[in-house]
Amino acid sequence: MRLLTLLNEIHYRETLGKGFESFLKKYSALVRKKEISQYSTFVSFTDYRSTDMDKTAAMKVDHMDMSGIYCYFLPYVLKYPADIWYASNAKYIQVIQGTWKKALYLKDNNDWSSLTNILYKMGFSDSSTLLQKAKKVYKHTGKKAPIMSFMSVVQADLSATPTIEQSWGVKKEVYPMRSAVEQTKLFLKAGYDAIIDEGTGAINEREPEQIIFLTRQSFKVIEVIPINLGKKEGAGISANRSGATEEHIYRKFAAAIAAKMQDKLTDKALTTNMGGWNVFFTVKGRRIELALSRPNSYFNRPLGDKPHKYDKKGTREKMGVRVYGEFGKIEFGDTDEMATAETCAAYFEELLKNQTNKDTNWAPQNQAGFLKQQKRENYIKAVKQEMEKPWRAESRIEKYNELRAARGLPPFSIDEYFQGALQFKNIFGEPMAEYN
């Protein structure tokens, strides 16, 4: 199995559990057979089995959007399971069928004229003016400017008097936000009982494809599948796709790299005080360090401009890899595009074939030896920092010399104190066991 494939599969399967696997097997058939029903079937991730909760399930949304039932398109969940942000810690999957009377398709109405008419139906007599005001206040630009401005008008009361807030010396107008229920009422007033986003990201830029059912009559639940039985019902769902499962991702990724070197992992990864890296050791004494992080290219883009269908089967983060062994330090990735798994595998296979550029000074190392080395290095670093400001140690020298005198030892100077410390000796000139 290719390493990248391994990483992808680990991420969503270990995050979503066995119940999700049974859901995939059952509903993949609809897409595979090109059943027309796939386009009216949706998926909601929830903490509640009872459909009675559907009426209030999203009344307290954790973002400034309308209240309703937020669902993914069935084909999207089946194709890109790792991109389901509000799924990794849900207790149940609800498979839902749409029964709406009239849905608002955001993508089809992304023009100023259509959106002006919709706002007019909501009761905004000055809809055109408000759209242009939203565009200016929230700096909406590009192709999505109309639909993003429309959502801003719905969410913020732009007719109210704004408050002035200052951040980093920049003054900004802040308008009061409408509640989730108030926003829903606006759409219902305009005649819509569902909102469908097929890629604009206007509702949530992290989830550009979704549907919101605004009334209980606009959908029906056809099946509830448990996917996280160990979770207490109603504990809450957060937007987290990895969490504790990252430990498994790192270990299996490291194990696959070790396997390419005809090696195996030993202890559990070191993570504390490792600078964000997960540090593994192998039977043959090699050290593998891994870290997931988002490349700079993820952040250096306009707000809302999510690369569509990017890394949806795996993690959005990129894996950074450092390996220490008989070939010296091997590091993959830079600040923008971190290492791919195939790069690692191909590189190690080539090294082992040619057996070139070996480090003759390398010696195998285990976890205990590494921790001891780290401890020694940190101690030396602390001593050298103290040597730069010797007056901090001068206040203790008198006390140290009293303790030495009690043992019949002559007094020592601050320079002698530092010299002994650098040799891992205590104030009595004895080797310190924890560093030797």
Image (cartoon, grey):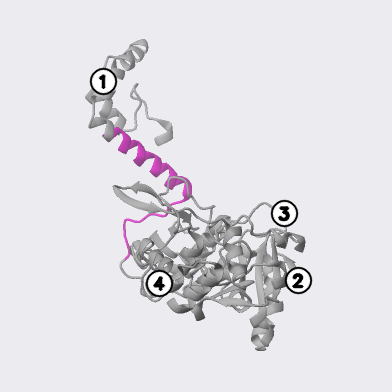
- The range drawn in magenta is 358-384
Which element carries disc 3, helix, strand or loop? loop
Closer to the camera: disc 3 or disc 4? 4
Find residue 27 and report its horizontal and vertical position in percent: 69, 78
Kind of residue indicated by mark 3: Glu
Q: Earlier in the sequence, mark 4 or mark 1?
A: 4
Closer to the camera in the image, 276 or 324: 276
Question: Which is in the foreground here, disc 2 or disc 4?
Answer: 4
Quadrant in which the N terminus appears: bottom right
Mark 1 secondary-structure assignment: helix
Inter-mark Cα distance, 2 to 4: 38 Å
Outermost residue, front side: 125
Q: CA distance from mark 3 to mark 4?
A: 40 Å
Tell me whether circle 4 and circle 1 mark residues in contact (CB < 8 Å): no
Q: Which mark is residue 233?
A: 3
Viewer-nearest of discs 3 and 1? 3
Residue type at mark 2 is: Glu
Identify the residue position indicated by label 4 in the image.
145
Instruction: From the image, state whether disc 4 or disc 1 is nearer to you.
Output: 4
Inspect the magenta stretch and tell me whether residue 124 lies in it: no
Report how far apart the C-alphas of labels 3 and 1 lie in the structure. Answer: 60 Å
In the displayed structure, 351 sits above or below 394; it is below
Residue underneath mark 1: 394
Give percent across and percent down for residue 120.
51, 71
